[in-house]
Amino acid sequence: MEKQQFFQVKLEGVGRCLPKKVITNDDLVKTLDTSDEWISSRTGIRERRVVSGNETSVGLAVGAAEDALGFAGIPAGDIDLIITATSMPDNLYPSTSCEVQGILKASNAAAFDIAAACSGFVYGLSVAHSYITNGTYKKILLIGVDVHSRFLNWADRSTCILFGDGAGAVVLSRSEDGRSDILSIDLRSDGTKAGSLKIPLYGKNCPFVEPNSPKEQYVSMDGSEILKFTLVKVPDSIKYAVGLAGFSLDEIDYFILHQANSRIISAIGTRLNIPPHKLVMTLDKYGNTSAASIPIALVEMLEQSKLQQGSTLALCGFGAGLTWGTAIVKWRAKDCRKAHG
């Protein structure tokens, strides 16, 4: 029996796409019993982007994908798999990935979605990594996109202040130099706490049976339960993934955690003795963009010239499911737009 060949994975490009409409805390004060100080001191969020008019998850996903493909200098036709991490698609079917594939004319790509909420990008990274290492695919476009603004109760101060809309994407490919940019991945879940954070999907019963009662389809969250889970489970995942990659916590250059709440990120940093300058925070401008928050933060770091060739990053997602996970990544990607521009 022929021995299976395994391949290494290269991170080639990153991109993002954000709605133009900005909603500030001062805007929310007009309809909620709150203040900019109350929101920002408890969450770190000062503004967020939201879709308007005919903007869609697919449109944001396409924008982020084009940005990442341009960064990588790779035409859409070279992509052989598209994975979209989203819990807020425009349609239950077709998948967001299939619609993106059609718009990009990525005719050689298979396409499917995964739903892991705010952990979706890390979960997708693991799936993409597996497909490339086992030789199934060579070039994968991974997108994280969520549009929460259309599924929020804008009279509920506990949830509507938190979320923003957006998309981020990365291009992953088979490494030609024998080095891998994905050094380790740890994925975990606890379905016994599934009700702690959810958006219910209510349908209408068949007319031949007893009718059901119509209900609103809004985000509901047990904030205290989410906080407890995050502060216990996430640090363990980070430590495990860092050790699995053969590093110590001190050797990680930046920790890019899901942008849920500045207090949560700071508390995790305190538990792991991570210096504040290594904790990336972008939620002041974008809020919680769910599956898009990590790639959006990567782009933000590049724009601020924080990422250097060879930087070692811990990417950590956590959220509904409950799900959480960490990936240790070596940053080696070069922006091909600069080379050609």
Image (cartoon, rainbow, N blue to C red):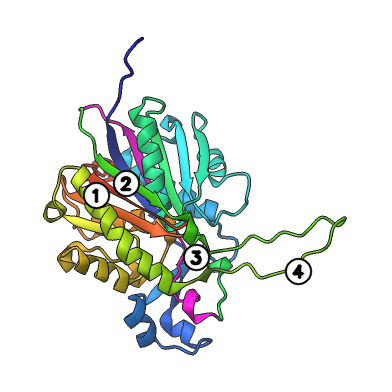
Dividing the picture into quadrants, the one containing residue 173 is: top left
Magenta-drawn stretch contains 228: no
Question: Which residue is at 26% across, 66% downward?
Answer: 268
* Type of amino acid under label 2: Asp
Question: Quick check: 62 left or right of 206?
Answer: left
Q: Give the mark, 4 or 3, whose residue is nearer the N terminus.
A: 3
Other-residue count near label 1 (Cα within 10 Å), few / some / many at <14 / 14–19 / ≥20: some
Dividing the picture into quadrants, the one containing residue 163 is: bottom left
Question: Quick check: 47 left or right of 11?
Answer: right
Q: Give the mark, 2 or 1, whose residue is nearer the N terminus.
A: 2
Q: Which mark is residue 186?
A: 2
Report whether residue 3 is seen.
yes
State the image coordinates of residue 244 (x, y, percent, origin top left).
Answer: 22, 43
What residue does disc 1 label?
240
Report whether residue 287 is seen.
no
Q: Which-is-in-front pick, marks 1 and 4?
A: 1
Q: Secondary structure at mark 4?
A: loop
